[in-house]
Amino acid sequence: MQKSFLEIGDIKAASGTKCFGSLGAIELADGSTVKIPLMVVRGVKEGPTLLLISAIHGPEIIGVEIIRRVLREEIDPKTLTGSIIALPVANPLAFQQSSYVTPYYDFYDLNRAFPGDLQGTTTARLAGLIWSVVSKSDYVIDIHAVPNPLGYGFTVVRPIGKVRIDDKALNLAKAFGLTITISKQPRIEESGRLPGLQIVASRSGIPSILVEMNGWRSWSKEAADAGVIGVLNVMKYLKMIRGTLQKQQGVVLPRSLQTQMLFANKGGLIHTEISPGASIKAGDVVARIFNVYGELVENIKTPRDGYLCAYPYMENQAVATGDYVALIGEEI
């Protein structure tokens, strides 16, 4: 029996209970408040604390449905070992406007703001509130989405060079059951981008995986099913619930992929040439860019053999120089 209460935000969860409340709130100019929804399931037996996060980016709504099904339909706190903390809408300001970034004051990407600052800008304060929960967790599953991913999605592992943490994260990804992609941290920082929550949490000793599902501004039952299976598989692996791991359906590659992002050099409309999940050979054209005059201005080619993982265009298929166009993966 877990003896102590789990106190987070305005929730005080006793063992064997499900609780729903708020992690905190942002006050708008008119004095109205926007709360960060918080869900807690406190098991009866002592065990790990698993944090589920969704909608760090406003258009990425699939995780809201995955978390709903897991906590509302799949988990009984009377048979749960450990605890689940869930933030179904981590950035409610972005969620309301279906915006990738916080649509107030700093217009910043919440995923690049951790560990945050409770005395800082709007996004920094949101990150600080969320970090207060991350720091209480043993494992993190951060649910994201891309518009057109490989199969029903893929799991991202970002090694930080600490074998114990990296191995645990990889084992979580294996349990989740989707295609695994390995993204090396130096490539992110060398590109000038700040590390995201997954890396910041891992560097703080909390093994974390990021899952890219098919659920950008809309979601499908098939993708939600894959997400629910994956979360439950992780919980089975961590011995939080009983059962054998369930095999994922759809496109699941047998080997991990080392990923690389491809960017546009020209501006115009993207024409995609290869379906996500398909194999590619070095030199293959994965996308073409036609400018507003209808002229072909760029063929985007893959530099190596592998697979086309996703076309994660952020708003639509119109791109500018430097826009992220495609994600490819090479078998490791």
Image: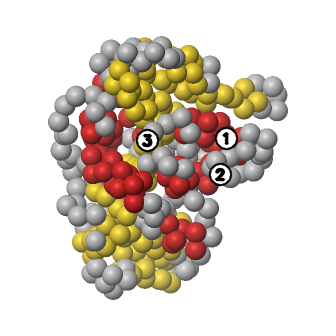
Q: Residues within 10 Å of mark 3 (few under 14, many from 20)?
A: many
| Residue 256, percent from left and from top | 28, 64
Choose the circle earlier in sequence order: 3 or 2. 2
Above or below 217: residue 41? above
For disc 1, the marked residue is 128
The amino acid pointed to by label 3 is Tyr
Q: Residues within 10 Å of mark 2 (few under 14, many from 20)?
A: many
For disc 3, the marked residue is 139
For disc 2, the marked residue is 113
Specify the quadrant that holds the N terminus. Answer: top left
The amino acid pointed to by label 2 is Ala
Circle 1 SS class: helix
Give yes or no for contact between labels 3 and 2 (Cβ–Cβ under 8 Å): no
Above or below 213: residue 258? below
Choose the circle earlier in sequence order: 2 or 1. 2
Give yes or no for contact between labels 2 and 1 (Cβ–Cβ under 8 Å): no
Q: As drawn, is 48 to the left or to the right of 92? A: left
| Of marks 3 and 2, the one in the foreground | 3
Q: As drawn, is 301 to the left or to the right of 265? A: left
Q: Residues within 10 Å of mark 1 (few under 14, many from 20)?
A: many
Depth check: 105 or 148 in front? Answer: 105
Above or below 143: residue 158? below
The amino acid pointed to by label 1 is Gly
Depth check: 164 or 14 in front? Answer: 164
- Identify the residue at horizontal 46%, vertical 74% (top origin): 262
Depth check: 179 or 217 in front? Answer: 179
Q: Is residue 79 visible?
A: yes
| Of marks 1 and 3, the one in the foreground | 3
Q: As drawn, is 62 to the left or to the right of 33? A: left
Choose the circle earlier in sequence order: 1 or 3. 1
